[in-house]
Amino acid sequence: MNEQLDVNALRHAPAAELDFTQLVEAERVHRRAYVDPQVFELEMDRIFGRAWIYVGHESQVPNAGDYFTTQVGRQPVVMTRHADGTIHVLENRCPHKGAIVCPERSGHAKRLVCWYHGWNFEADGSLAGVPVRSGYDDTCFDPSDRANGMKRLPRVENYRGYVFASLAADGPDLQTWAGEGMRGFDNVVDRSPTGQIEIIGDCFRTVQNSNWKIFIDNMSDGMHTSFVHHQTARAAKRTLEKFKIEHAGGLQVATLLAGAPDQMAKTDLVAHPNGHFDRRPSPPNRRDRTRRSTRPT
C-alpha cells in the first residue's frame, strides 16, 4: 500500500470509517477487502442491498402458478408467474410468522401455502386466505390489506427474458445501471433465430467456500485456464479427434482452455462503471462481412 497511508488504520479501523480507495489500488488490494467481516457486511448493504441482481429467466416459470426460488443478497425470494401472465419477485417469507413459504427450488402451485400456519397467497403475493378466519374477529387484521401479503421486491425488470430485481426502492433503471454490459445478454439472445431463448433443465450449481470476490476474480482471469483446466481441455481435444464429432458444441469450447498462457492472458476484458465486466466483443470475421455485403437487397 502507499507508504503515506496509516497502515494501522487500514488493519484495525472500523470498516465503516475506512476510505475504500485506500484498500484498493491500481495494482494491489489490501487483504481486509477479502477477509474482514465488517467489510463484507457493508458489501451486503451497499452492493447486494442496492444493485440489480439476476433472479432467473422467464422460461423457468412458463405457466401460471410456476415458481422458482433463489436469493437476492441474504433475502430468499421466489419468482412467480401470475394468472395474468405477469412475473413477480416476492420475498420468500410469510408475513404472519416469517416462515419460508416455498422451500423447494422450483415447482407449481395453484396457491403458495405457508407450511407453518397455512396462510395462502396468490402468485402476485396477495393474501388469498387464512385458516380459522374467525380467530381474527375483533382485531385490526384486514385480509384485503396488501401489507398482509407476501412482500414484493420494490424494483423488478425483465430484459429480453432475464429477470432482475433490486432490494432498493430508488436507483437507476436496469439498462442505465448495466450500460454496455447489457450487450452480453443481447449476444446470447440474438443467436436464436426466434429472438428468444429457453432455460432447459435446472441450473448447474456449486458452492464455493470463499469470499464472493474470489469467484469474480477467477471468472475475470483468462490465464489460469492454461494450468487449472489443462487436463479437461486436452481430454476434449482428444475426444474430438478420436470420434470426429460433427457438432462439437461445448467440447469445442473446452479445447480453447488449453491455449498457451501468453495467448490466454490476452483475453480482453472490459470493466464497467458499476462493477460488472464482460469480454470485449470480437468484430465479425471476414466470411460474415462478405456474406452480409453480398446479401440481396
Image: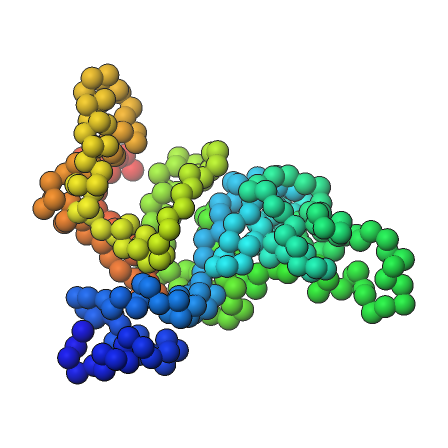
- The quarter of the image holding the C terminus is top left
Q: Is residue 248 left or right of residue 125?
A: left
Residue 237 in view here: yes
118, 67: nearer the viewer = 118
Looking at the rendering, which quadrant does residue 47 occupy?
bottom left
Q: Position of residue 278 (x, y in %)?
A: 28, 53
Residue 181 in view here: no
Q: Position of residue 59 (x, y in %)?
A: 52, 40
Q: Is residue 202 left or right of residue 293?
A: right
Q: Residue at x 26, y 72 (%)?
A: 23
Looking at the rendering, which quadrant does residue 9 occupy?
bottom left
- The quarter of the image holding the N terminus is bottom left
Q: Position of residue 231 (x, y in %)?
A: 20, 32
Pick out the residue farthest to the top. Answer: 243
Q: Residue at x 76, y 52 (%)?
A: 117
Q: Is residue 93 above or below residue 199?
A: below
30, 291: nearer the viewer = 30
295, 133: nearer the viewer = 133
Q: Is residue 40 above or below residue 101?
A: below
Q: Residue at x 47, y 65 (%)?
A: 49
Q: How many marks?
A: 0
Q: Is residue 82 left or right of residue 208?
A: right
Q: Residue at x 20, y 17 (%)?
A: 242
Q: Is residue 203 above or below residue 56?
A: above
Q: Position of residue 270 (x, y in %)?
A: 24, 57
- Colour logic: rainbow
